[in-house]
Amino acid sequence: MRKRILATVLLTSTTLPIQAADIDVKNDVIRISGKIQLNDLLALEVETDGLNRPMVVSLQSDGGAFLPAIRIGTLIKQKGWSTHVERQCLSACAIIWLSGSRKSMSTAARIGFHQAYDGETRQVSSLGMNVLRSYLAKLGYSNEMFEFVTQAGPADVRYFTEDDSKRLGVQVIVGATAEPSRQADERPLATNSLAPVRSHVPIQSLNDSLLLRRRPK
């Protein structure tokens, strides 16, 4: 039923590109794989419509569009779901991973971050960086975490390790998958959390060409 609804929505949404990421729900696991694109928040909402039980979101992606990742992460935070990376999760995918009320990664996981940039000019976007800072603040992360996430330039990647989790005060389960969760964790995700950043430009007016992409080969 959900897939029929999704197909109808996508066919009638002529102004939006076709869903890029593969989203699959089975038991207490939501799997998101592939490039993150504009329709993926809508697809996730359709696939998880009516789900009121603890879930873990398993992520596998080289990245994709910045704003959909922010919106997907916001939804996961609101639902209080856990997030997990088994293999690779870069750029926009890593931004989503940070939203989990419980976060986990395998010992072989590669979770990489870099600065937000404009997909057309390939230059760092100050507006995109401000949105990212505000997003991390709302998740409760520290200024040190923001600096870590944005340390690498658009053509580089900074990988997150177990040592980083300890140094930055971010609770991460390493070597096992986090238990599915539903209730948002009221405890701070990190110490010394950022104050929210107010932007004069609404997030809806941002150009969705702002991308977080993996390092070019």
Image: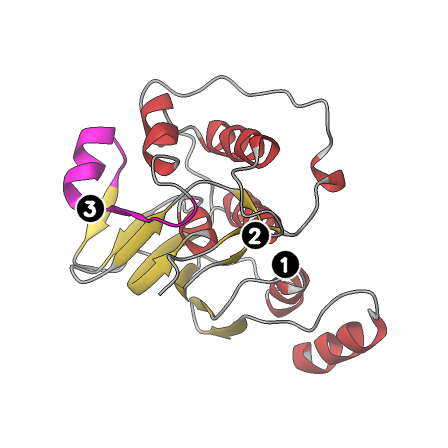
Q: Helix or strand or loop: what does disc 1 sit on?
A: helix
Amino acid at circle 3: Thr
Q: Nearer the viewer, residue 110 or 76?
A: 110
Q: Secondary structure at mark 2?
A: helix
Residue 5 vs 118, above or below: the answer is below
Position of residue 166 relative to residue 48, above or below, is above
Tag 1: Cα neighbours inside 10 Å, few (<14), some, or many (≥20)?
many
Residue 205 seen anywhere in this rendered image of the structure: yes
* In this view, the mark in front (2 or 3): 3
Q: Are marks 2 and 1 in contact (CB under 8 Å)?
A: yes
Specify whether 88 is left or right of 201: left
x and y, in percent, of residue 131 in the image: 58, 33
Foreground label between 1 and 3 = 3
Which of disc 3 and disc 1 is earlier in sequence? Answer: 1
Where is mark 3, residue-wise? 161
- Distance from disc 2 to disc 3, alpha carbons, whole Å, reads 23 Å
Assign the N terminus to one quadrant of the image: bottom right
Give the residue type that dot 1 points to. Leu
User: What is the quadrant of residue 168 in the picture?
Assistant: top left
Per the model, the C-alpha gap separating discs 2 and 1 is 6 Å
Q: Amino acid at mark 2?
A: Ile
Of residues 211 and 8, the one drawn nearer to the viewer in this rendering: 211
Residue 41: which disc?
1
Q: Which residues are magenta?
A: 154-171
Which image quadrant is residue 130 in?
A: top right
Pick whichever, 124 or 52, lies toward us: 124
**Vertical side of 159 occupied by 110: above or below:** below
Task: Kindly identify which numbered label has been placed on residue 72.
Answer: 2
The residue nearer to you, when weighing 29 against 157, is 157
Q: Earlier in the sequence, mark 2 or mark 1?
A: 1
Q: Earlier in the sequence, mark 2 or mark 3?
A: 2
